[in-house]
Amino acid sequence: MEDKAPAKETIARLKSAYPDARTALDWTNPLELLVATILSAQTTDVRVNLVTPNLFAKYPTAADYARADPAELEEAIRPTGFFRNKAKSLQGMARALVEDHGGEVPRTMAELVALPGVGRKTANVVLGNAFSIDEGVVVDTHVRRLSNRLGFTDQKDPEKIERDLMETVPREDWTVFSHLLILHGRSVCKSRKPECENCTLNDLCPSAFRV
């Protein structure tokens, strides 16, 4: 593309602006992160974090989810929305962990996406944050919007956006890059009214509105 912000400088500035960039989900082990990420679909991280303390206490292992009473599990996650489908995904994922992985969360993309309810986005979250494995780039609504505005991609499909970002962003920054864009998208580069005048990237971004 003709107009594209320099990736390394963009990342350096965002790291300076958000030095503690990390996932907003609360978790203490890979299973908790996997569960929280599945629950985060079509809801906010804040809402998930309200549910997970009691959930994690009640179901500390994959076996606990696998043998849980479906109605009780549904009720426990009801506030996250789509609770029936999410409960099925959690139990299917947990049974697969017990049967195929000794109850442990696997560390490869192929094994993770083979789990019920786990797509590439969820797998990237777990690999990057729980295991520090930069296998890909998480593409959510903020990452999609900001990547287009910065000129890193002109695609709309998440998988195509991810491929473009993997070619542009240094591999060691794949995980943190998503956190940086999410934080920047929430605080400055908002969907309807981006605050270009307050943006640390306004002299780099091809989409910036400059007075």
Image (cartoon, grey):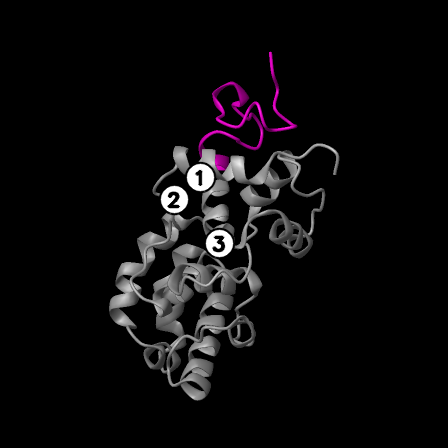
Q: Nearer the viewer, mark 3 or mark 2?
A: 3
- Mark 2, secondary structure of its residue: loop
The residue to which callout 2 is attached is 21
Give me the C-alpha separation between circle 1 and circle 3. 19 Å
* Place of residue 101 in the rendered image (x, y in percent of width and height, measured from the top left): 43, 84
User: Does residue 88 sit above or below 156 in this rendering?
Assistant: below
Query: What residue is rendered at 47% in x and 21% in y?
Result: 198
* Place of residue 172 in the rendered image (x, y in percent of width and height, measured from the top left): 48, 54
Toward the right, the furthest residue is: 2
The residue to which callout 1 is attached is 183
The residue to which callout 3 is attached is 172
* Place of residue 173 in the rendered image (x, y in percent of width and height, measured from the top left): 49, 50
Bounds of the magenta span? Answer: 183-211
Identified by mark 2, the residue type is Ala
* Place of residue 117 in the rendered image (x, y in percent of width and height, measured from the top left): 53, 70
User: Does residue 146 sit above or below 192 in this rendering?
Assistant: below
Circles 3 and 2: CB atoms closer than 8 Å: no
**Is residue 205 highlighted in magenta?**
yes
Identified by mark 3, the residue type is Glu
Nearer-N-terminus badge (2/1): 2
Give me the C-alpha separation between circle 2 and circle 1. 7 Å
Q: Nearer the viewer, mark 1 or mark 3?
A: 3
The quadrant in which residue 35 appears is bottom left
Identified by mark 1, the residue type is Leu
